[in-house]
Image (cartoon, grey):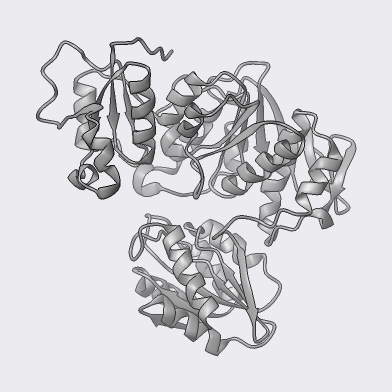
């Protein structure tokens, strides 16, 4: 267990927003902090100058670990650093335990935690559940691995909340050993981040770590239609509830266009205003958690009727000349992209492509051939995708160099009542710092038409 002892030391590896927050918290509690970042610009950037000038910490390097008897009790490591990073190997040689920010923060807060993970839909589920609990009168924090959103560590400087709802990633969970959510949710598990986890099995196991410290009075929520989730259900020690679109389960299920919790009707499908049928799993998972907490059906329904989703996630931008423009820049894996595309009933002009993550694009390629009226390919892997489409005898596609060209090309191919869907299916790092920057670039061009 994590205990803060005044005068002891902790290492912070990665001085981003979260690293700075935790550093201030530790110093406030009279803990010595050793900080490290591979990027020296972190310590010279204008926004960090005050932080550095305060000399709250010692900047360490792999070759110059402080010569002191004050060895760090543990290291809080940015989830962006892979296990192969030399600083990680260095910490291991020093036998310094490595943990994630959510492990640390969860040890500092006292009230119940609801943790949500999954390949797709976890951000939507996190925010939707937060809004439902807030509407029910709870003082609630929601954030974590949510972009844009507040890191979990932000709560260290806030008044205590009734409930903490946090989105957690596989990278974070892989460095958690005592993290204990009262309610833990997996929306689904499909292939993703295989550039980091190496094998799909490793990725699956990292997701299931969300249940590893739960006890018999805690709750696990699983997608009954998700093969990966059901494969590992026998490892769970807490109470398991399911959600399903297809059959009766012990939990939440869909029947005759109505949503039920066990045998009691909660709401109608028509109450859900989210754009995209595949977000239904997120809604069902959220309703399951809400009913565990005895939230009134009226409150759940009221929030569902006003919740239209998150920025860059199937975000409706505008309708111009009868054409709808949808920003789904957050979509960074082919399975999610295929599900999104399959959910449309109107003709779709698709803009796709980005940076590969060692994921098989076949499922997305096949969806394109079935559902796309035309495909505009944009990004680092456009040649790969173009070749794959032609292999599947699909030739209604065009490669472009810029996002502006992509939008203008899609516009020329579209007719009134069509949808122009920006759903890359791959990472943004070929041209942009993150999916938000990519989505904003797309939105800006759409609004300028």
103, above or below 125, in the image: above
Q: Residue at x 48, y 27 (%)?
A: 156
Q: In the rendered view, does 293 fall on the left or right side of 69?
A: right
Q: Is residue 124 visible?
A: yes
Q: Name the spot of residue 370 as percent of width and height, x first.
A: 61, 74
Q: In the rendered view, does 403 fall on the left or right side of 91?
A: right
Q: Is residue 352 visible?
A: no
Q: Residue at x 75, y 40 (%)?
A: 135
Q: Name the spot of residue 27 as percent of width and height, x first.
A: 33, 22
Question: Between residues 337 and 387, which one lies in front from this camera angle?
Answer: 337
Which quadrant of the figure has residue 230?
A: top right
274, above or below 302, in the image: below
Q: Name the spot of residue 170 as percent of width and height, x first.
A: 46, 38
Question: Between residues 42 and 190, which one lies in front from this camera angle?
Answer: 42
Q: Residue at x 43, y 34 (%)?
A: 172
Question: Between residues 170 and 72, which one lies in front from this camera angle?
Answer: 72
363, above or below 52, in the image: below
439, above or below 235, in the image: below
Q: Name the spot of residue 210 as percent of width and height, x first.
A: 53, 29
Q: Residue at x 40, y 57 (%)?
A: 434
Which quadrant of the figure has residue 126?
A: top right
Q: In the rendered view, does 108 fall on the left or right side of 219?
A: left
Q: In the rendered view, does 78 fall on the left or right side of 240?
A: left
């Amino acid at each position: 267990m994590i205990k803060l002892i005044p005068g002891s030391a902790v290492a912070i590896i990665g001085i981003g927003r979260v690293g700075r927050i935790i550093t201030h918290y530790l110093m406030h509690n009279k803990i010595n902090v050793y900080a490290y970042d591979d990027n020296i610009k972190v310590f010279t950037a204008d926004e960090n100058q005050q932080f550095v000038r305060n000399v709250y910490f010692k900047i360490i390097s792999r070759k110059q670990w402080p010569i002191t008897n004050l060895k760090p009790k543990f290291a809080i490591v940015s989830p962006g650093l892979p296990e192969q990073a030399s600083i990680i190997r260095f910490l291991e040689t020093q036998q310094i335990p490595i943990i994630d920010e959510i492990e640390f923060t969860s040890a500092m807060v006292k009230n119940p935690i609801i943790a949500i993970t999954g390949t797709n839909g976890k951000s939507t589920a996190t925010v939707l559940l937060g809004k439902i609990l807030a509407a029910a009168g709870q003082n609630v924090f929601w954030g974590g691995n949510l972009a844009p959103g507040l890191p979990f560590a932000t709560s260290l400087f806030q008044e205590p909340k009734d409930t903490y709802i946090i989105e957690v990633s596989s990278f974070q969970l892989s460095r958690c050993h005592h993290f204990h959510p009262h309610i833990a949710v997996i929306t689904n598990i499909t292939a993703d981040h295989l550039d980091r986890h190496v094998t799909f099995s490793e990725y699956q196991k990292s997701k299931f770590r969300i249940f590893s410290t739960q006890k018999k009075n805690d709750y696990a929520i699983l997608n009954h239609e998700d093969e990966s989730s059901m494969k590992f259900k026998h490892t769970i020690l807490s109470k398991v509830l399911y959600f399903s679109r297809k059959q009766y389960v012990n939990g939440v299920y869909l029947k005759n266009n109505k949503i039920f919790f066990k045998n009691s009707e909660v709401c109608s499908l028509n109450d859900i205003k989210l754009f995209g049928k595949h977000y239904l799993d997120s809604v069902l998972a959220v309703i399951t958690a809400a009913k565990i907490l005895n939230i009134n059906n009226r409150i759940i329904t009221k929030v569902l009727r006003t919740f239209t989703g998150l920025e860059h996630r199937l975000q409706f931008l505008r309708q111009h000349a009868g054409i709808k423009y949808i920003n789904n820049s957050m979509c960074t894996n082919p399975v999610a992209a295929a599900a999104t595309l399959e959910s449309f009933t109107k003709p779709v002009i698709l803009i796709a492509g980005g940076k590969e993550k060692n994921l098989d694009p076949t499922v997305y390629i096949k969806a394109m051939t079935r559902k796309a009226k035309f495909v505009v390919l944009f990004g680092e892997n456009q040649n790969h995708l173009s070749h794959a489409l032609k292999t599947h005898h699909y030739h209604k596609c065009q490669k472009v160099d810029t996002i502006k060209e992509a939008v203008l090309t899609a516009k020329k191919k579209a007719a009134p009542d069509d949808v122009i869907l920006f759903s890359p299916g791959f990472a943004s790092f070929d041209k942009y710092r993150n999916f938000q920057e990519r989505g904003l670039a797309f939105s800006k061009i759409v609004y300028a038409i």
